[in-house]
Amino acid sequence: MPSSFVSGLVGRIRGHDALERELVAVVGRGRVESGAGALKLYSRDGSVTRGGHPGIVCFPETTAEVSACVSTAARHGRPFVPRGAGTGLAGGAVPCEEPVMVVTTRMDDIYEVDVERRLAWVGPGVVNLDLSRHLEGTGLHFAPDPSSQQACTIGGNVASNSGGPHCLLYGVTSAHVLAVEVVLPDGEVVVIGAEEGRAPGYDLRGAFVGGEGTLGIATKICVRLTEDPPEVATLLLDFESVQGAADTVSAVIAAGIVPAALEIMDQRVVEAVEPFVEAGYPMDAAAVLIVELDGMTAGVAAAVARIQDIGTANGARTVRVAATEDERARIWKGRKSAFGAIAVIKPDYYLNDTVIPRTRLAEVLTRVYEVVEERDLIVMNVFHAGDGNLHPLIVFDAREPGVMERVLEAGEEIVRISVEAGGVLSGEHGIGLEKKRFMPLQFSPADLEAQDRLRRAFDVNGLANPAKVLPSGASCGHVTSLGRAPEGTWV
């Protein structure tokens, strides 16, 4: 073995040991992990994409500790990757280049709730649903509601600019973040944005939200709180065709009605979910449409009547309005449990996330079915129809020879079809490792260069979550196996 290789290896090991000792001095021995079990556990997120593995995993509890971790990594020339609950679906938290992984789940304090000004300061490790539960009784809630909201964290929502069923009316996470305390890639701590709303100068808050950890690490987040509506109505419509459900969505928006949510599930999803949740979904429906309206009582009642007429005119067989809170909760449980129930069909899955114009929903869905059937696969569709955010779920058995190649071919074709229809690469899951190679489908070389220059303005040395989002530079992402659908998998 060449002596240069041996000496290089010894130097690397010594450097790693020195890095670990310094990190232990910063956060304590019990909150630094480098064993095989921890490195394997934190080598993946909720996506199918695999990279390498972290070099060291840290669990800071304060902004000062995050800053110290990042500064230490920078002194050693080591990259770092921020990570929340690991529910991301685009490989954004998958480690590349043996980084220092900074896990923020212990930073779960709700520091302040100002009911009068309708804002709260929270740690990045606060679970999305826990914030709204904490606000019960105040007349306020945190509007973004990813379907993983009982597990995902606010920090992760900020990183990927998460959406959810109710983003049709209320907007995605960026519309609900006023300010962020950020540890920059050199360890400096800054606050971008302002409690009062728009901060003077460039909108750095807007650039940071959705940056997928490539611009720094959020350590405190000031979120905008939304007033609870006085009236809520949830409708369930069922159709003999997906076309009828899609046409109803377009007609509702064309009528000037903007519901809080418009969600479609196709027949295969209904067949998987209904035995589990007993929500009353008609098992023979080609598609069901969930519509939620909120606002003043008279306005909601008028919108319910109008949607009943629109649905019937577009082929709805039945239109049901939830009569009780329990009935409403069951309807939504079916939607949010959809991907936990797919194992009754096949043990493995590949999930996609694109956005298309609403007017082309039926056309693109027809093509999605064709693409999958051409490859002898099964697809299930459950998606945010109101804003055209598709989530085709290809289910299969990875033990079948050659199936993985067909699945990946179908996934790539779905992305291309969506972009060609005037859509975009992602609605809420982000780009991460999974879709970085598709970025040139949507952006010109000049566009990508501008994004890269923005990134380098924050991160001169390229240490913050390397190899993510932009197609240039190193790449560590690959698919070694596609993910099984554990209980509690959401989209």
Image: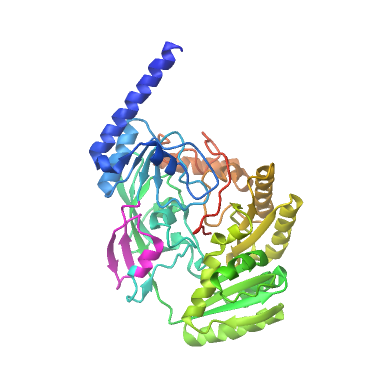
Q: Is residue 327 left or right of residue 373?
A: left
Taking depth in this image into account, of 259 and 444 the one nearest to the observer is 259
- The residue that appears at 56% across and 64% down in the rendered structure is 338
Residue 62 position, x and y percent, is 26, 49
Assess whether residue 276 is covered by the magenta stretch: no
Residue 49 position, x and y percent, is 54, 44
In the rendered image, the vertical position of residue 59 relative to residue 244, given as above or below:
above
- The residue that appears at 54% across and 39% down in the rendered structure is 477
In the rendered image, the vertical position of residue 12 relative to residue 374, given as above or below:
above
Assess whether residue 121 is covered by the magenta stretch: yes
Taking depth in this image into account, of 231 and 462 the one nearest to the observer is 231
- The residue that appears at 47% across and 56% down in the rendered structure is 161
In the rendered image, the vertical position of residue 461 relative to residue 10, given as above or below:
below
Q: Is residue 387 left or right of residue 62?
A: right
Residue 422 position, x and y percent, is 66, 56
Q: Is residue 171 left or right of residue 387?
A: left
- Please provide the residue range marked out in magenta: 105-133
